[in-house]
Amino acid sequence: MPAMHQKPSFLVGLIGSGIAASRTPPMHEAAADAAGIRYLYKKIDLTELKLGVEALPELLAAAQRMGFDGLNVTHPCKQAIIPLLDELSPDAEALGAVNTVVIRNGHMTGHNTDWFGFAENFRRNMQGAALGRVVQFGAGGAGSAVAFALLKLGVQELTIVDVDVTKAQSVVDGLSPRFEDVRLKVGGDVAAAVAAADGIVNATPIGMDKYPGTPLPAALLRPDLWVAEIVYFPLETALLRAARALGCRTVDGGGMAIFQGTEAFRLFTGISPDPDVFFATFASLGG
């Protein structure tokens, strides 16, 4: 009998709390089907397992023993996982956060694809947008990745606003040495910063169903301002709705979630997936 052609196969997982509704597993599996490879994506939900970040060493050891090729990592593990890894990519090191771990021959390398997700979404939807001065709201885990992406995209002056000023200062201090030609600062007077800006980014959870509202007073928006969002539950946040009503150029948060996923898939498999499959799966899962 002729030998059967064995498709390449991959076993990956997602570690985080409250990930039951995550769209990542079905997006990855659909992309693998389209690429003709076998791919199993398991959710390792700390909430369901009644575990905290202290279980990470045990979970990583188990993943290695069971032959996992990689893991995605989300809240609350993105920082806690760093000391447990063998190596960090330059991007993960710059951000002090990991969302993708590639496992090869027992060696675990941490990557960060969140910044790539934001940058790629912006590049595709905001061609020609002015990048002189940008105000970013939010300096949490996602905030540092978004700030990194904005600086990589060529923003000349970036003002970070957060209710916790020490968090904003920490992002500024962390990224300033890596982008010496850019002005990075903590924002105090929001109205003045937005008045002088070309665009604004929401990197806070405000706008999600459980955190309704807008990260800045909607009265500060004006038609020549572009507005980017990272929230994608719902896809149209109150901020985007207000901005679109004025005629602002906008980009929603769905693409960031998709492109961080396509980059993680590429790191796991060595294959660049079709983003359209990710988009179609994402859309099919409803708002």
Image: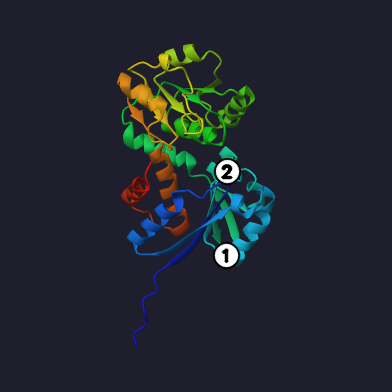
Residue 196 seen in render: no
Which circle marks residue 75 in the picture?
A: 2
Point out residue 271 in the picture as x, y percentages from the top left corner: 39, 57
Task: State whether residue 81 is above or below residue 231.
Answer: below
Point out residue 78 in the picture as x, y percentages from the top left corner: 59, 44
Between 189 and 87, the residue placed more toward the observer is 189
Quadrant in the picture for residue 240: top left
Task: State whether residue 121 is above or below residue 160.
Answer: below
Between 37 and 76, the residue placed more toward the observer is 76
SS under mark 1: loop
Task: State whether residue 114 is above or below residue 137.
Answer: below
Q: Residue at x 56, y 36 (%)?
A: 141
Q: Label 2 crowding class (10 Å Cα cut-off): few <14, some 14-19, many 20+? A: some
Query: Which quadrant of the figure contains the C terminus?
Result: top left
Q: Residue at x 59, y 53 (%)?
A: 48
Between 246 and 18, the residue placed more toward the observer is 18
The amino acid beneath tag 1 is Asn
Quadrant in the picture for residue 36: bottom left
Residue 33 seen in render: yes
Q: Residue at x 49, y 23 (%)?
A: 215
Point out residue 182 in the picture as x, y percentages from the top left corner: 49, 24
Between 243 and 89, the residue placed more toward the observer is 243
Query: Which quadrant of the figure contains the N terminus?
Result: bottom left
184 vs 272, left or right, is: right
The amino acid beneath tag 2 is His
Which circle marks residue 182 in the picture?
A: none
Residue located farthest toward the right when viewing the structure as drawn: 54
Q: Which residue is mark 1?
A: 105
Mark 2–mark 1 distance (CA, rounded to whole Å): 26 Å
Point out residue 88 in the picture as x, y percentages from the top left corner: 58, 48
SS under mark 2: loop
Q: Indicate which disc, 2 or 1, sits on the residue closer to the N terminus.
A: 2
